[in-house]
Amino acid sequence: MRVRQHFSRLQILWMTACLSVTPAISPGQGGAPSDPVTEAGLKFARVYALVEEHVSDRLNPDPIIFDGGIRGMLETLDPFSAFFDRQQFTMLQQQARGEALGFGSILYVTPGKVLVLETARGSPSWRAGLGPGDRIVEVNGQRVDSLSFPSLVQLLRRARSHPVRLGVIHPGHYVAQDFELRPAEVALPTVDLSFKFARANIGYVHISGFEGNTPEEVYNAIQQLGGANLKGLLLDLRDNHGGLVESAIRVASLFLKPGQVVLTVRGRAVKEKTYRSLPAPAEYTFPMVVLVNGGTASAAEVLTAALEEHDRAVIAGEPTFGKGLVQSIFPLPDKTGMALVTAQYFTPSGRSIQRPLPGTALEAGKLGLGEPTQFHTDDGRPLTGGGGITPDVPIPDVALDPWMSFLSAGGNFTSFASNYLTLHERIRRSFEPGAKVLEDFRQYLRRNNIRTPEEYWGADQSLLKLRIRVALLNLVFGLKAGNEAEMRGDPQVGKALALFPRVGAILSGPNAPSADLGFTAHRSQRAAVCARRADISCANTTNLQRVIHRR
């Protein structure tokens, strides 16, 4: 939504500020301002005055100044500086608090169908009794199946910030019930999944972003999984686009010793400052593997780099995004705001996280503080510069074949699961699709004129079973149950889990202490000795572990 009339006071204030500095130009200087800000302001004012006087139609000044002037100015700087209108700035503030205005439901939306996948505890949807598998058939009297997909999405977006009347069919029923919901502030947890691999006693925690409550959420999740008694932690930061850096520092403090450097900030108008790990409610010393990918960015990269460079965790997965910029938020009049890149982040070793961006003000990226050309961890392991974080152990994601990509993009698994549940008894959490379910799915595809090529059908059997199971668990037990099943079957997660017996060996560098006992200092004595002397028996043991884990 564009805000127009609300900008008038900001427009007046801004133009007054430009004009108010002109008396500082003393007579005799030819009226030429020497201040660059004044010069730029007067240029804009002259151009706007000519446009307003001579353009053929009457002007609406707000889109010219804000959409054209301010947004255009910021877009020339870099891809990250931005202007926020009133609605966008309110949403930004809610996000920083870990809240959003709405009903607390996660929906699956496809043409003609809206299914509830999850409802947040205490939210308006939860209090009304909505849950996984419920089908929304009417929104404010409009039938969902009578709307085009764009119209349906638009209707749902409009409805989330106003009182709404829903027609809902519960699983196993055929008659819709009416529900009236009023939007409210709903908590948005950033630790959206945590569970334990019971046999290995290793915890799994996924952080989707960094907001004000994230450190407490991470601490609570680890404590519920076993706390310091865990044998290891797999921290999943894939597709974590960042957030509040202060939050990432507090999360790092759970795993680092107090006082260790987490990052340094430097900018033209920002005084250089180094941030260190803080006293935390717990200082966990179990082995760690951090899983990253190309969607891991900003504050998530800050945390990743700190754990890597202090030899605290093995970084696995794919190279990260490379966004190491400080975006300062400046409130503007009339509840609008602006994000401006004001500085860069540098890791404990001095590396710049930011990758160069050709065609922008960030085209020439810095390698690091003081422009060193080589970087190392505390124990002397070499690191790569040039932006982003390169994993210690590369684990590429598994690419879907074209047929499986088509099935997933079309929402076929969720649609099949919805139909399946209307014809069968409620499944249990331990449900595993067998040959009969696969044949039902094949018949479902044929009824919907979707081919099942034999070359893909045979090769994708395991993945088909997993996707069907996840879709059914989503609709019966909620999104967390489905996500857990998906992560337990995720090939990247499986390979990252197999790294734990080798964490000590991977983290050992030339400066590692030779008298290191156990994992109290984050590596094992045996692994450290193996790495330092290239013992043949140790190497054979490591190779054997690799063979076992591949199987």
Image (cartoon, grey):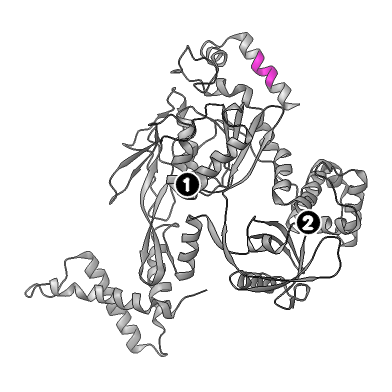
Q: Residue at x 48, y 27 (%)?
A: 311
Q: Amino acid at mark 1?
A: Ser
Q: Main secondary structure of the magenta part?
A: helix
Q: Compared to 521, does 118 lie above or below?
A: below
Amino acid at circle 2: Thr
Q: Give the image location of residue 442, x and y in percent.
A: 89, 53
In reply to whether residue 544 is colored magenta, the answer given is: yes
In this figure, which residue is indicated by the disc labeled 1?
298
Q: Answer whether residue 246 is visible to the viewer in this image.
A: yes
Res 484 → quadrant: top right
Q: In the image, is residue 34 part of the stretch drawn in magenta?
A: no
What kind of element bears circle 1? Answer: loop
The segment highlighted magenta reads 541-545
Label 2 element class: helix
Q: Is residue 540 above or below residue 251?
A: above
Residue occupying image coordinates x 49% and y 60%: 94
The quadrant of the picture occupied by the C terminus is: top right
Q: Is residue 336 above or below residue 186?
A: below
Of the residues tagged 2 and 1, which is closer to the observer? 2
The residue drawn where x is 79% and y is 54% is 413
Spatial CA span between label 2 and label 1 = 33 Å
- Image coordinates for residue 383, horizontal then vertical, percent: 46, 30
Left or right, residue 252 beside residue 439: left
Residue 419 horizontal/vertical position (percent): 86, 59
Check the image and report above or below for 204 versus 103.
above
Instruction: State the image coordinates of residue 191 (x, y, percent, origin top left).
Output: 58, 46
Foreground of the two, 156 or 323: 156
Q: Is residue 387 visible?
A: no
Q: Residues within 10 Å of mark 1 (few under 14, many from 20)?
A: many
Q: Which residue is the site of mark 2?
A: 414
